Image: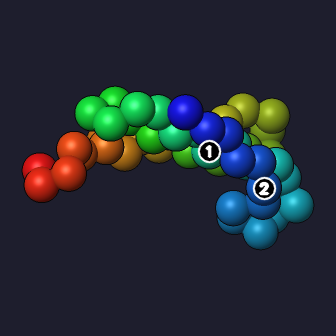
């Protein structure tokens, strides 16, 4: 599991990326200008899958 914080969109707002265990979802929370976050998920695949 992990967490990274940075400005992914280069818009001056802090975005958050979380990682999980194999078979779960990694999530990118992109900060929008209205104070909300847009959530994008990517499924982790075990090796060979």
Question: Horizontal and vertical percent for residue 2?
Answer: 61, 38
Is label 2 in a helix, a strand or a loop?
strand
- In front of the other: 20 or 37: 20
* Residue on which disc 1 sits: 17
Residue 22 versus residue 30 in the image, above or below: above
Decide: marks 2, 1 in contact (CB < 8 A)?
Answer: yes
The image quadrant of residue 23 is top left
State the residue at coordinates (88%, 61%). Answer: 12
Question: Horizontal and vertical percent for residue 31?
Answer: 72, 44
Question: Horizontal and vertical percent for residue 22?
Answer: 32, 36
Is label 1 in a helix, a strand or a loop?
strand
The image quadrant of residue 21 is top left
- In front of the other: 25 or 35: 25
* Residue on which disc 2 sits: 6
Query: Callout 1 environment at 10 Å: few (<14), some (14 to 19), or many (20+)?
Result: some
Residue 19 versus residue 49 in the image, above or below: above
Residue 23 versus residue 28 in the image, above or below: above
């Amino acid at each position: 599991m992990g967490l990274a914080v940075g400005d992914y969109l280069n818009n001056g707002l802090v975005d958050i990326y979380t990682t999980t265990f194999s078979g779960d979802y990694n999530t990118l929370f992109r900060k929008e200008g209205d104070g909300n976050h847009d959530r994008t998920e990517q499924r982790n695949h075990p090796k060979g899958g």
